[in-house]
């Protein structure tokens, strides 16, 4: 069979590899640029994930999103190019609570994890940055974060899944880059017959996999006439506390160490607290951040809608985070707990000021009042760049799109609800468990 896979990110690389392993012909089509073995751009390969985000054409520069009902529309980050978001993300490598997956009726998760090819490695002590060190000293529950690296190098989904195919001599795999898929084409019965590119070219196939991510997969479906795609969009609601550091404690904790962008976190019930040791090379050197996120939000989710039939025009994205009062309350409590921690050693001696925005407003405005924190969150709540679930309502258990034979989805848009951890490894696992359910794939070896 000939398959088209749209999008070469976390999920698309898995789908292309597993379909190829099973003996199918695969055409992988990616909107952004390629990279080859030996030619990975330095910032993607390196230890600064902010630098990876700065590589030309590696993100969607015009993509905006609204996080909360009262919040502004601001830029939303998505990876672009071979490797997708796995090439620019912060590399946090967590699997998530097995009970949450079981609650979705997924009984094949262990086998899918066994097939997953993305490595996870804890950073070395010398790689810890100043916020990592403070967090580890402040709270016994803090731990260094496993990262998607091997021997200190980022391993993208492309390197883990595609490069082994490229090393074989094969006429069954083709990768087309810098080409945007406009829509899926169907026969009169609604079965997928291939795709149409934004330049008008048609590529025919026996089956099509959409793996363009939770923002772009529903836009391709909407342009294809599948109007019901794009609801139930989720992310982890979050709040960034900007920390201006002093160097008072520098000697004891070695706070001069720049370290990785992030390498430590705390998990406290539904709350994850992530260190950001620096904010990229263009940000002031004395600024850092603690990101506080609610990992099990409730609510119906938001929407992705195309605003034009032109695939170059970005969609309207509205996450509608924190609408549910429980979500607002739990995240506000998480922020209050972190502020309390910041007022005690070792943070107290190392943090000059805590800002809640980039206009110089300090956390003192809350006066330790939970309602004031909640009010701020309802206006300025952030996301965690973990878009998911925007196509869950239109697919069956194998990722097949209702009413459209030969059309499958296996990216983060297919989660029935958001995982309780950072979404790259769970998306990889999701793609592993869906691909084996497709025609002619079951039983293929990894
Ligand atoms: C800045 C950032 C930091 C993150 N940090 C972490 C982290 O530390 N840990 C973690 O677990 N998760 C993290 N995530 C989230 C995680 O990386 C994503 O959830 C995951 O990679 C999503 O995988 P995906 O396959 O659904 O989409 P993606 O990996 O985003 O892949 C989608 C691909 O489809 C392509 N595409 C889109 N539209 C089209 C089209 N029309 N035609 C052709 N191709 C198209 C895109 O260019 C892209 O390459 C982060 C994400 C971002 C953006």
Image (cartoon, helix red, strand yellow):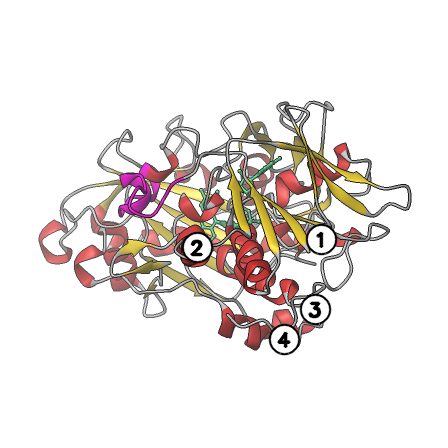
Tell me the crowding category of disc 3: few under 14, some 14 to 19, or many 20 or more residues within 10 angstroms, Cα based: few
Q: Name the residue under label 2.
A: 169
Query: Which of pointers 2 and 1 lies earlier in the amino acid sequence?
Result: 2
| Residue 240 coordinates in the image, percent (x, y) | 43, 43
| Distance in Å between CA atoms under marks 1 and 3 | 19 Å
Q: In which quarter of the image is residue 138?
A: bottom left
| Residue 371 coordinates in the image, percent (x, y) | 57, 45
Q: In this view, does 33 lie above or below 253?
A: above
| Distance in Å between CA atoms under marks 3 and 2 | 40 Å
Write down the region rendered in magenta.
35-51
On residue 108, which mark appears? 4
Q: In this view, does 218 lie above or below 429?
A: above
- Do labels 1 and 4 touch, CB within 8 Å? no
Q: Which residue is drawn at 83% across and 53% down?
A: 402
Q: Mark 3 points at which residue?
A: 104
Looking at the rendered structure, the secondary structure element under dot 4 is: loop
Q: Mark 1 points at which residue?
A: 408
Note whether residue 420 is visible: no
């Amino acid at each position: 069979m000939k398959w088209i896979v749209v999008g070469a990110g976390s999920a698309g690389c898995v789908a292309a590899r597993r379909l190829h392993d099973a003996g199918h012909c695969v055409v992988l089509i990616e909107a952004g640029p390629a990279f080859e073995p030996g030619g990975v751009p330095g910032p993607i390969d390196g230890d600064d994930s902010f630098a990876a985000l700065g590589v030309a054409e590696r993100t969607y520069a015009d993509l905006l999103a609204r996080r909360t009902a009262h919040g502004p529309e601001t830029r939303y980050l998505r990876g672009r190019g071979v490797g997708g978001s796995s090439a620019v993300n912060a590399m946090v490598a967590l699997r998530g609570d097995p009970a949450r997956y079981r609650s979705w009726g997924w009984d094949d998760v262990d086998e899918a994890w066994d097939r997953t090819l993305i490595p996870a490695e804890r950073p070395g002590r010398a790689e810890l940055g100043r916020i990592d060190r403070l967090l580890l000293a402040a709270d016994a529950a803090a731990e260094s974060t496993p990262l998607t690296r091997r021997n200190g190098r980022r391993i993208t989904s492309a390197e883990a899944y595609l490069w082994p195919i490229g090393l074989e001599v094969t006429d069954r795999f083709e990768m087309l880059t810098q080409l945007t898929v406009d829509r899926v084409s169907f026969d009169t019965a609604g079965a997928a017959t291939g795709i149409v590119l934004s330049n008008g070219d048609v590529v025919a196939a026996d089956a099509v996999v959409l793996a363009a991510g939770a923002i772009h997969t529903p836009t391709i479906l909407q342009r294809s006439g599948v109007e019901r795609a794009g609801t139930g969009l989720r992310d982890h609601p979050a709040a960034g506390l900007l920390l201006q550091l002093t160097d008072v404690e520098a000697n004891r904790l070695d706070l001069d160490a720049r370290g990785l962008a992030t390498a430590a976190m705390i998990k406290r019930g539904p709350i994850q607290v992530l260190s950001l040791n620096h904010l990229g090379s263009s940000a002031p050197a004395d600024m850092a951040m603690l990101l506080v996120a609610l990992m099990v939000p409730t609510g119906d989710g938001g929407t992705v809608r195309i605003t034009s039939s032109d695939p170059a025009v970005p969609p309207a994205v509205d996450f509608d985070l924190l609408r549910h009062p429980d979500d607002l309350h739990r995240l506000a409590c998480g922020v209050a707990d972190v502020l309390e921690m910041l007022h005690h050693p070792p943070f107290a001696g190392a943090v000059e000021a805590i800002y809640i925005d980039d206009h110089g407003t300090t956390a003192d405005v809350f006066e330790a009042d939970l309602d004031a924190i909640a009010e701020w969150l309802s206006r300025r709540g952030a996301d965690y760049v973990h878009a998911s679930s925007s196509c869950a309502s239109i697919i069956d258990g194998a990722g097949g799109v209702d009413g459209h034979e030969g059309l499958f989805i296996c990216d983060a848009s297919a989660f029935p609800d958001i995982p309780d951890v950072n979404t790259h490894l769970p998306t990889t696992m999701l793609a592993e468990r869906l691909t084996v359910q497709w025609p002619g794939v079951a039983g293929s070896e990894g």
